[in-house]
Amino acid sequence: MIAKNTICLWYDGTALEAATFYAATFPDSAVNAVHRASSDYPAGKAGDVLTVDFTVLGIPCIGLNGGPAFKHSEAFSFQVATDDQAETDRYWDAIVGNGGQESACGWCRDKWGLSWQITPRVLTEAFTGSDPAVAKRAFEAMMTMTKIDVAGIEAAVKGP
């Protein structure tokens, strides 16, 4: 069954590689189908992988090998809620350690240029809670971090 709404991500010939990495890294993820071009197209030849249907953390996606015309940007990212430091470290290290790049405040970019927010739930709960002082302390702590340090956020939530 074709999903009503699917995220389409543009790649320069590496959609299958990316989808395979996501499926191996995140639960509830899979490469569902690989579709090859029936004829030559601007970014490839007949028989090349044109699209890949895959799922990332339960979200249906299509990877389109459209060529070098468009690049990923931070305007789109997957935000992954983590339960503890071990899970945060596992996803962060998988993305950054596989040719990715660190950024600030829990953001990183995979080797294909796709942005990820690896966000411990304790941080989101602090931001969305009813106490503005807790939200401020958590925000200020986060602003000093690259990968989110759960203990640091918990200390900020607790306060002085």
Image: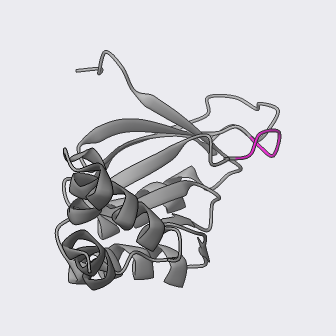
Instruction: In the rendered view, tell whether residue 45 sits above or below residue 148.
Output: above
Is 128 included in the stretch rendered in magenta?
Answer: no
Q: Is residue 159 left or right of residue 149?
A: left
x and y, in percent, of residue 56 in the image: 32, 49
User: Farthest front residue?
Assistant: 160
Q: Nearer the viewer, residue 3 or 44?
A: 3
x and y, in percent, of residue 68 in the image: 81, 46
Residue at 50% over, 77% down: 145
Residue at 27% over, 60% down: 134
Is 68 included in the stretch rendered in magenta?
Answer: yes
Instruction: In the rendered view, tell whether residue 93 sits above or below residue 24.
Output: below
x and y, in percent, of residue 135 in the image: 32, 55
Q: How is the image coloured?
A: one colour
Q: Quadrant of residue 64?
A: top right
Q: Is residue 20 left or right of residue 65?
A: left
Where the C terminus falls, by quadrant?
Answer: bottom left
Residue at 22% over, 50% down: 131
Residue stretch rendered in magenta on the structure: 67-71
